[in-house]
Amino acid sequence: MDQKAIIEKIKQHKKQPNLRFALKERVELFTNQLFYTLFDIDTPVDENLEALKVDFEVLAKLACWECEKPCNKIWNGYLESLPGVLESLNLDAEAIVECDPASMSIEEVYLAYPGFYAIAIYRLSHELHKAGFPLVPRLMTEYAHSKTGVDINPGAKIGKSFFIDHATGVVIGESAVIKDNVKIYQGVTLGALYVAKDLKQTKRHPTIEDNVTIYANATILGGETVIGANSIIGGNAWVTESVPPNSKVFHSPEIKIKTEING
């Protein structure tokens, strides 16, 4: 097969007319610029917001291939949401400082904590998700996922003063609900019991009430599963049923000691 034939074959199999990887790259630039605008003291807010507006218009053209959906009109509403998002993120940072004895300063949280970064990009993407802006919110959280190891779907609903410690391996599904003052540790999964496509419009992921702590590598599954307020879920626990308020759930490992007698 000559090169011309190979090229034609490749063109035949490029079946997605709206698949532009420039969108992914532009989202990553937009996300970085947005983060700096909100937090970096040397970044001028007024100038950057104007630049972000221009970038957003480019994203709208790349992401919105359905002309009847005026994505470029979403920017004004998104801009109005940013002060509230920043207020929530400052509460998240303060919760990390208060809860983590290893934190030396709040600046360290903003600069060095992957859990905070993942929460920040989630909150920024969630506002676009609520507005129905296609694909961009998911690309934002996937960018944070690649940098932190934390996978938070932009459709999840997360309350105030959220704390993710150590971060790596955390998964929070699309219909998960997390209320106020919740702490989770590395490897925690808030997932679905079933993954059938026809369940897309149903609540598949758990609800975590106020003041719950979930320790490392715990797995909580199911849309009807509710972890009651003030509960503690121990490390490596597997939970698929609701837990009443003020509960403690622990995984009890089976320990076998190897000896010469029993092999």
Image (cartoon, rainbow, N blue to C red):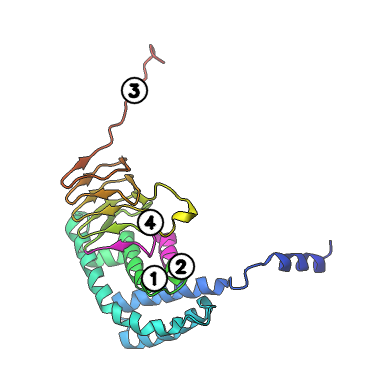
**Amino acid type, mark 3:** Lys
Give the residue at mark 4: 173
The spot of residue 79 in percent (x, y) is 33, 82
Q: Would you place residue 133 above or below residue 221 in this image?
A: below
Q: Name the residue under label 1.
A: 129
Place of residue 165 in the rendered image (x, y in percent of width and height, measured from the top left):
28, 54
**Furthest-top residue in view?**
261
Q: Mark 2 points at which residue?
A: 139
Measured in 3D between alpha carbons, the distance from the residue under mark 1 to the one under mark 4, in whole angstroms, is 14 Å
Mark earlier in primary sequence (4, 3): 4
Q: How crowded is mark 2: few (under 14 residues within 10 Å), some or many (20 or more)?
A: many
Task: Identify the residue at image location x=38%, y=88%.
Answer: 50
Q: Which of marks 1 and 4 is nearer the N terminus?
A: 1
Q: Residues within 10 Å of mark 4 (few under 14, many from 20)?
A: many
Gap between marks 3 and 2 measured at Cα: 45 Å
Is there any visible trace of residue 92 in the rendered image? yes
Mark toward the viewer: 3 or 2 = 2
Q: Are marks 2 and 1 in contact (CB under 8 Å)?
A: no
C-beta proximity under 8 Å, tags 4 and 3: no
| Marks 3,1: beta carbons within 8 A | no
SS assignment at label 3:
loop
Which span of residues is magenta-colored? 140-160
- Mark 1 residue type: His
Above or below, 78 against 159 in this view is below
Residue toward you, 167 or 195: 195
